[in-house]
């Protein structure tokens, strides 16, 4: 018969000295495995006489239980030590900077629109808005478009399916309907409620927003952004319009002074009408505003047509005004050197990462905006 005391002492010593879980598992298999020494002793009970089994059985079973308990206790100690080691090795150093994360950027169109609003706000212009889906009256008729004007054709304008009442609405082709809505709602003479914060004339508003036309090339996109400007007051003339636009161009392009010129043009909603050119230099494949001996058409405007003033319930003999329209995306491309307007709407994050603006950048000295 094996000396149980010596066997137990040897196994307990090896269990206590096991340096890792693998070594402890080896001792467990040697003692309690299918071919282990303690398992062999338990199997030998079947060949003993009843008197021997009565004596040896409790001793061998007790050995098995004590060895199993020692193994479980040692396993717990080793697992705790392993966990402590992993925690120590994987400790988070809060003094290190966080891993870099992708950041969003302000789209150049939105940046430029904010710059334009800030400049005109300093000149006393209020902000007005209107719906993207317009009716024929606000988009064409009230703005003095004749019935057969090309802009009313399907190849120039996105028309929607006629409604239950037969009216066919459209995606607005310009932001000029905003001025009609402001003048008609802001004029007490037509019986409409006041549209705060706008009142009866004098009116001085800008109306930015999306517009839609069937056109697509490097300098045109089916959807783009415009900003409409409108002033209605007494004794307004073209000199007021030119001063306003000169001040805006100088501030927007951050120039000390600006050289501009008016060229006669035709718009249904202004009379007289003009396109405004700004001095530029086109050498070296770039357009630089405010220098050189060349010219660049940059916007259109003129005196509000008397028919429009009359359509809004005002007397054109008492009230005059000027209006102008600016392409927001085109001004952004000119100021920040973007060659193709279509890229501005391509949803390419690489393009936005290159041309976009940080929402937390230092303020622009020209506009006060970041």
Image (tube, rainbow, N blue to C red):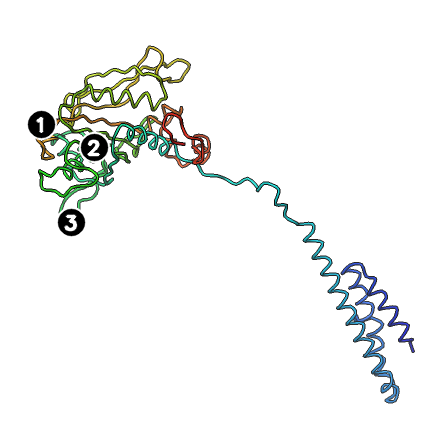
Residue at the (48%, 39%) spot, across then down:
103
The disc placed on residue 164 is 3
Q: Of marks 1 and 3, which one's residue comes earlier in the chain?
A: 3
Instruction: List x then y, in percent, for residue 36.
Output: 83, 70
Quadrant in which the C terminus is drawn: top left
Badge 3: residue crowd in 10 Å (few <14, some 14–19, many ≥20):
few
Residue at the (45%, 38%) spot, across then down:
104
Assess whether mark 2 and mark 1 are in contact (beta carbons under 8 angstroms): no
SS under mark 1: loop
The answer to which of 38 and 368 lies nearer the viewer is 368
SS under mark 2: loop
Instruction: List x then y, in percent, for residue 161.
Output: 20, 44
User: For the residues marked 1 and 3, what is the alpha-carbon distance in whole angstroms?
Assistant: 41 Å
Query: In the image, which is nearer the foreground, mark 2 or mark 3?
Result: 2
Residue 93 quadrant: top right
Residue at the (27%, 16%) spot, across then down:
260
The answer to which of 30 and 319 lies nearer the viewer is 319
Q: Which residue is mark 2?
A: 176
Q: Which residue is mark 1?
A: 318
């Amino acid at each position: 018969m094996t000396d149980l005391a010596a066997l137990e002492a040897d196994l307990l010593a090896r269990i206590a000295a096991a340096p890792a879980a693998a070594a402890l598992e080896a001792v467990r298999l040697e003692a309690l495995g299918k071919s282990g020494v303690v398992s062999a002793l338990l199997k030998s009970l079947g060949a003993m006489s009843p008197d021997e089994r009565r004596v040896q059985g409790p001793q061998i079973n007790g050995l098995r239980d004590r060895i199993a308990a020692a193994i479980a206790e040692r396993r717990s100690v080793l697992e705790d030590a392993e966990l402590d080691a992993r925690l120590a090795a994987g400790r988070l150093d809060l003094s290190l900077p966080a891993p870099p994360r992708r950041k969003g950027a302000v789209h150049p169109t939105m940046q430029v629109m904010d710059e334009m609003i800030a400049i005109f706000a300093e000149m006393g212009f209020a902000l007005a808005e209107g719906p993207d889906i317009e009716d024929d009256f606000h988009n064409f008729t009230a703005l003095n478009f004749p019935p057969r004007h090309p802009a009313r054709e399907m190849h120039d304008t996105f028309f929607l399916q006629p409604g239950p009442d037969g009216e066919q609405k459209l995606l607005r082709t310009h932001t000029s309907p905003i001025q009609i809505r402001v003048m008609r709602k802001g004029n007490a003479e037509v019986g409409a409620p006041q549209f705060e914060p706008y009142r009866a004339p004098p009116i001085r508003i800008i109306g930015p927003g999306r517009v839609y036309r069937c056109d697509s090339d490097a300098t045109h996109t089916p959807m783009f952004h415009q900003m409409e400007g409108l002033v209605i007051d007494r004794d307004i003339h073209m000199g007021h319009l030119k001063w306003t636009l000169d001040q805006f161009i100088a501030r927007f392009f951050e120039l000390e002074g600006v050289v501009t010129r008016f060229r006669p043009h035709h718009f249904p909603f202004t009379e007289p009408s003009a396109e405004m050119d700004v001095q530029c230099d086109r050498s070296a494949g770039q357009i630089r505003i405010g220098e050189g001996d060349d010219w660049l058409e940059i916007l259109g405007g003129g005196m509000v047509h008397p028919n429009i003033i009359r359509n809004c319930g005002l007397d054109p003999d008492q009230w005059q005004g000027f209006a102008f329209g600016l392409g927001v995306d085109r001004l952004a491309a000119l100021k920040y050197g973007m060659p193709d307007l279509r890229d501005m709407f391509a949803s390419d994050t690489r393009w936005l990462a290159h041309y976009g603006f940080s929402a937390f950048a230092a303020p622009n000295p020209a506009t006060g905006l970041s």
